[in-house]
Image: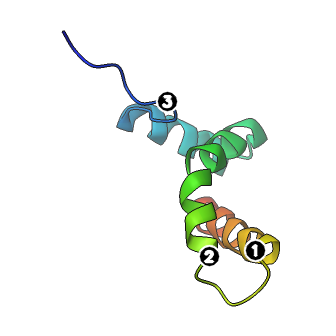
Amino acid sequence: MEKENAQGTISDAEFIQLLNLARSGDQEAMFRILQLFEEDIQKTSRYIRMSREDAVQSIMTDFIEELRQ
């Protein structure tokens, strides 16, 4: 029996579709991508020398800019 995907994971094809939608201005798609990476963003923010909230915001801003390119 095949294991189910962990919650918060999607196939490559689904991600590419979300990415294309986000690049075309779909805010819901962008939000979904950010949700998928939320845990990684939180973990990474611990290593930045600023308040955790500011670090998360900075990472998210940079990530959104990269996704839009």
Rendered residue at 49%/30% (across/down): 7
- Counting from the top left corner in percent of width and height, residue 64 is at 67, 62
Q: How packed is label 2: few (under 14 Cα within 10 Å), some, or many (20 or more)?
A: some
Q: Is residue 69 visible?
A: no
Q: How packed is label 3: few (under 14 Cα within 10 Å), some, or many (20 or more)?
A: few
Reading the chain from its start, which is encountered first: label 1 or label 2?
2
The residue labelled by disc 3 is 7
Taking the image as shown, residue 30 lies to the left or right of residue 39, namely right
Residues tagged 3 and 2 counted as in contact (Cβ below 8 A): no
- Counting from the top left corner in percent of width and height, residue 52 is at 75, 74
Quarter containing the N terminus: top left
Reading the chain from its start, which is encountered first: label 3 or label 1?
3
The residue labelled by disc 2 is 46
Quarter containing the C terminus: bottom right
Q: How packed is label 1: few (under 14 Cα within 10 Å), some, or many (20 or more)?
A: some
* Rendered position, 59 above or below 25: below
Q: Amino acid at mark 3?
A: Gln
Rendered residue at 64%/44% (across/down): 35
Q: Please, which colouring scheme is shown?
A: rainbow
Q: Residue 52, labelled with which disc?
A: 1
> Which quadrant would residue 21 be assigned to in this image?
top right
The residues tagged by marks 1 and 2 sit, at their Cα atoms, a distance apart of 7 Å
Reading the chain from its start, which is encountered first: label 3 or label 2?
3
- Secondary structure beneath dot 2 equals loop
Q: Amino acid at mark 1?
A: Arg
The residues tagged by marks 3 and 2 sit, at their Cα atoms, a distance apart of 23 Å
